[in-house]
Amino acid sequence: MKNILISGGAGFIGSNVALKLITKGYHVTVLDNLSPQIHGDNPAKTSPLYQSIADKVTFIRGSVTCRHDWEKAIDGTDAIIHLAAETGTGQSMYEIQKYTDTNIGGTALLLDLLTNTKHRVKKVVVAASRAIYGEGRYWSEEYGYVYPLSRTEECMARGDYECKYAGCTQPLKLVATTEDSKIHPTSVYGITKQVQEQLVLTVCPTIGVAPVAFRYQNVYGPGQSLSNPYTGILSIFSTRIKNHNGLNIFEDGKETRDFVYIEDVVDATILGLEKDTANGHTFNVGTGVATDVLTVANTLIKKYGIDVPVTISGNYRLGDIRHNYADITLAKTLLNFEPKWTFDVGIEQFAKWVDNQDIQEDKYEASIEEMKHKGLYK
């Protein structure tokens, strides 16, 4: 398998995977629509991600919602890494058709073509997401492992942010989320990623194509968009700090995520492409470590040496989860995957990269007003 197609290959993860594959001797084709939200209005000048691959890959500017674009891209392809998707939990709650058309519709179109046309594709690697789990996995002294439902607006409005489970009288203990944990997404984005994964895992084996799915945790690192206010807390905070604007910390700042460095994500993805032991499986890709949002904010302020006010506001977004971090035992066992980057080392590299970038326009307040208007921000 030497000819690899990456949908969304000009994005943060896709461009880094493409560059690594090229160094390993692969020929890479990229299908990407160069969305202005990620790449700016003139990608040749405004998108370092696109610029990093433009002269190194066969580039097709097109959409995964267009049959002709898929047909052109698939021609001669041995394997597909399907990363193209609309991303952003909050935005997905009001741009519902856009998210479903791209994430679900685009994947369905790909599989329809693989099922009904002649091709030589042997494997499809699909980017799923930790968002499909909704709230993470917990241990209850009374009930064992439990999976709380979405937190209610009533509870969050009174500052009660931790997850509850019906009948439990003792506090829940957060534990790592395994691949066989309950799937119950709390956002449209999470639902679309769940369906993407299920479509690939269901259809591909029936047509002789090996499927692999990766549930990425919160991916970060040099190269990620600093201008997109809808996704990437490290980017959002960095752009705020660089503009000397204060940070508004939602809830109480103790909500946690599993932040995984881009190089580890690239390594895991390529292992999934190359190893037959990956076939038919879904893998968590993270570090197995939970880091709270307040720690992220304070670390970035220290790295940049810019003192901005940090307000723990108690604001919250409907659809946000409280905690989630990955159990990566399966990836370690079947893929020999081992994350090399701790959060402390990774955020140091990220901050050094940000320091060398032009300061981006801070669009955070506009995105908040948009969510307020939709009734999602409180």
Image (cartoon, rainbow, N blue to C red):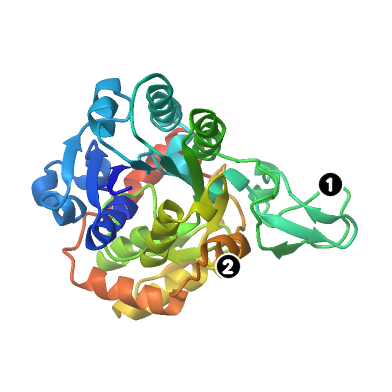
Q: Residue furthest top?
A: 116
At numbered mark 1, what does the secondary structure look like: helix, strand or loop? loop
Disc sitting over residue 328 in the figure: none
In this orientation, does residue 255 appear?
no
Instruction: Where is residue 9? Give x, y as percent.
Output: 28, 46
Q: Amino acid at mark 1?
A: Ala
Q: Residues within 10 Å of mark 1 (few under 14, many from 20)?
A: few
Q: Which residue is mark 1?
A: 166
Instruction: Where is residue 156? Give x, y as percent.
Output: 65, 50
Q: Is residue 330 above or below residue 355?
A: above
In this orientation, does residue 128 appear?
yes
Residue at the image position 25 percent from the left and 22 percent from the top: 68
The CA distance from mark 2 to mark 1 is 27 Å
Looking at the image, residue 338 sits to the left or right of residue 6; the answer is: right
Q: Amino acid at mark 2?
A: Gly
Which mark's residue is nearer the viewer, 2 or 1?
2
Looking at the image, residue 362 sits to the left or right of residue 313; the answer is: left
Q: How many marks?
A: 2
Residue at the image position 30 percent from the left and 54 percent from the top: 12
Nearer to me, 227 or 20: 20
Q: Is residue 100 above or below residue 237?
A: above
Instruction: Where is residue 229? Give x, y as percent.
Output: 34, 49
Disc sitting over residue 288 in the figure: 2
Q: Is residue 156 above or below residue 254?
A: above
Residue at the image position 39 percent from the left and 24 percent from the top: 109
At numbered mark 2, what does the secondary structure look like: helix, strand or loop? loop
Kindly indicate the quadrant of the structure image that contains residue 154.
Answer: top right
